[in-house]
Amino acid sequence: MRTSISKTENLRALIDREARRAGFDAVAVTTPDAIPQAPARLAEFVADGFHGSMGWIADTLKRRGEPTALWPEVRSIIVLAMNYGPDHDPRAVLAKRDRGAISVYAQNRDYHDVMKGRLKEIAGKIVARAGGDVKVFVDTAPVMEKPLAEAAGLGWQGKHTNLVSREHGSWLFLGTIFTTAELAPDTPEDDHCGSCRACLDVCPTDAFPAPYRLDARRCISYLTIENKGPIPHEFREKIGNRIYGCDDCLAACPWNKFAQAASEAKLVARADLREPPLTDLLALDDAAFRSFFTGSPIKRIGRDRFVRNALIAAGNSGEPSLRDAVCALLGDASPLVRGAAVWALSRLVPETEFAKCASAALKAEGDEAVRREWRLALANQIEAHA
């Protein structure tokens, strides 16, 4: 027994040391059965339709809610966190209407790429020391990282449903190592949100029907990233100039006052994504988009969805200087882009000019969804000036 305990202690010391060496800011251990409430909460989320078009969540319900359903051999789960806290309030760019607001996490190299290789290195050293088997996960697999991180003691899931840490606020990337090694679990973290509602009240689209519950269909991160179709009209103005994700609920968290800014070198930060001009983004064709966003998580949504987002921001900008860039996209090959361009133009030019554009465009437009955008925009302009 004494030898077994000694080996476990040595293994945990190795994990802690290697995690720090790999650039992780926190590491803790939990057990596969530590999140018994997760399956029911996840099932309720799906039953209410809050997952929107993210069908993979419903498809992987069983494996996602129970770690042993994903991998029956797992005995311990190591949760690792990397701080990506900004050195400024990311909401400041929202006042610069001719610029695009990109979520802080996406202003860096894709965190999947940054973290996965480092997790594999640590996992390899665990196997070399203790034998057995390991599996590494970073967000893309059906693993509920946030409940596991809470069970491991790295923080707690706040009312905005994201992990909150007393040391790092709401700015943590999470990854996990599943192992067959038996490790002593850490103590779960308590909820320290109290009566605070800052994250709920700041949400531009009222995406929280209740504390600790998120309706993804109303969330700007979902609307600008996961949503493959047009942005619903009811949310377009509320999106403002947020062109990829939204940091409002994270940035509002009072626990951020204890967070330290992350190392830009460690995250491979992109200064050109901090406040990019909308004129530059609207000009991106597919090749330019792929080149500009090489290594960025933004690349995965594709050029059309991204330009759609930039057009919504242009329509909200009130900047007549963006008129030509928007007009150039009325003939884009993508109906998704053309439809967003119609809406943007209707908010940037006078009624008479827009009516002339509509008259010519409707004769040539073959996509019914885009034709509806023209008709609705015309009706809205007439109503606004009635």
Image: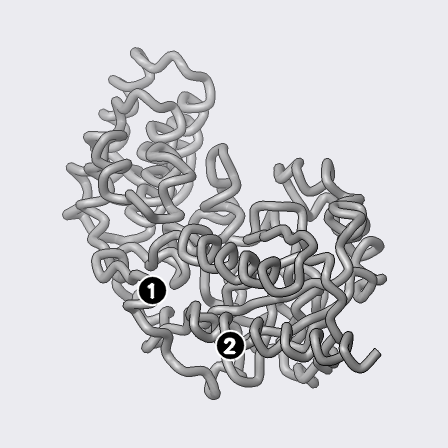
Closer to us: 48 or 262: 262
Could you tell me the amino acid type at mark 2?
Arg
| 240 vs 211: above or below | above
Q: Which disc is residue 94 wearing?
A: 1
First in sequence: mark 2 vs mark 1:
2
Kind of element beneath mark 2 = helix
Kind of element beneath mark 1 = helix
Closer to us: 79 or 92: 79
Closer to us: 36 or 207: 36
**Horizontal side, residue 164 vs residue 233: left or right:** right
Q: Position of residue 52 (x, y in %)?
A: 64, 41
| 207 vs 260: above or below | above
**Horizontal side, residue 163 vs residue 59: left or right:** left
Q: Position of residue 7 (x, y in %)?
A: 70, 75
| Residue in view at x 61 percent, y 65 percent | 129
| Residue in view at x 33 percent, y 34 percent | 303
Which residue occupies the extreme front position in the image?
3
Q: Position of residue 58 (x, y in %)?
A: 73, 39
* Colour logic: one colour
Q: Which disc is residue 17 wearing?
A: 2
Report the number of numbered marks.
Answer: 2
The mark lying in front, picked from 2 and 1, is 2
Q: Quadrant of the N terminus?
A: bottom right
Could you tell me the amino acid type at mark 1?
Leu
